[in-house]
Amino acid sequence: MPEIFSPRSNSIARALTFGAPLVLFSLVAALYAVEWSPWATRAWAPISQPVQFSHKHHAGQLGIDCRYCHTGVETSRFAGIPPTETCMTCHSQLYTDQALLAPVRDSLAQNRPIVWNRVHDLPDFVYFNHSIHLAKGIGCVACHGRTGREMNLTWQDQSLYMAWCLQCHRHPEQHIAPRDQVFDIHWQPLAEHGKAGREEARQLVKDYAVQSSGRLTDCYTCHR
């Protein structure tokens, strides 16, 4: 009776048995890497602007408080983009002839706002409120990273994926800050300060009346 399978069939079967899972694993790993890469998330990629504004210079070196420019951050869901008049409060006297600031001067002269490029652009189906996060002790650095310490050009510091949001909502004590450190650009998580820091963080969760994790992870909290 003639052979049904050739002698090399065993080699092919072994290759498929061990190779197919490896190929599948590699494909999944590659897709995962792409999904979390800056190409997909837009994170860690500096965004060019009509005026190359430096948070590192203004907030870090000059010590200008975040709220001076982002005036609505404590009272509304949107932090607010400063009007040209805010920029010209200083730049009507400082660096008045700098070519870099020509768009600012033109904006004021023409009474036309500067069109900034969005850095943090959430989908329309996601509800986010700056004011409630600040009121509950979640400071600027927790989401925006070391903006005032490192960013000459601003970039998105986190993926903004739902998994990232949920991680904070499930463990707010890892990101909560004392009231006087909410706008501190040098803030570091209390959990990094040992047992005492972790205990202080848990107490702040109670003091701020942060809701239980079950309420914070309900769909309607962010999807309205």
Image (cartoon, helix red, strand yellow):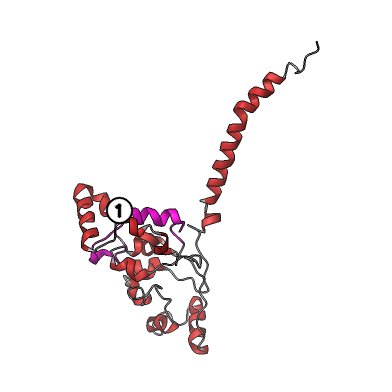
**Type of the residue with mark 1:** Gln
Q: In this picture, which residue range is highlighted in magenta?
A: 156-185
Q: What residue does disc 1 label?
A: 174
With 217 as the anchor, is 41 left or right in this view? right
- Residue depicted at 39% across the width and 55% down the height: 166
| Quarter assignment of residue 60 | bottom left
Q: Is residue 80 magenta?
A: no
Q: Between 166 and 64, which is closer to the camera in this rendering?
A: 166
Horizontal and vertical percent position of residue 147: 39, 63
Residue 103 in picture, x, y percent from top left: 52, 80
Residue 3, percent from left and from top: 78, 14
Magenta span contains residue 168: yes
Q: Residue at x 76, y 17 (%)?
A: 6
Residue 203 at x, y percent in the picture: 20, 57
Q: Residue at x 21, y 52 (%)?
A: 197
Q: How many marks?
A: 1
Outermost residue to the top: 1
Which element type, helix, strand or loop, lies under badge 1? helix
Q: Is residue 200 left or right of residue 66?
A: left
User: Is residue 118 positioned above or below 218 on the image?
Assistant: below
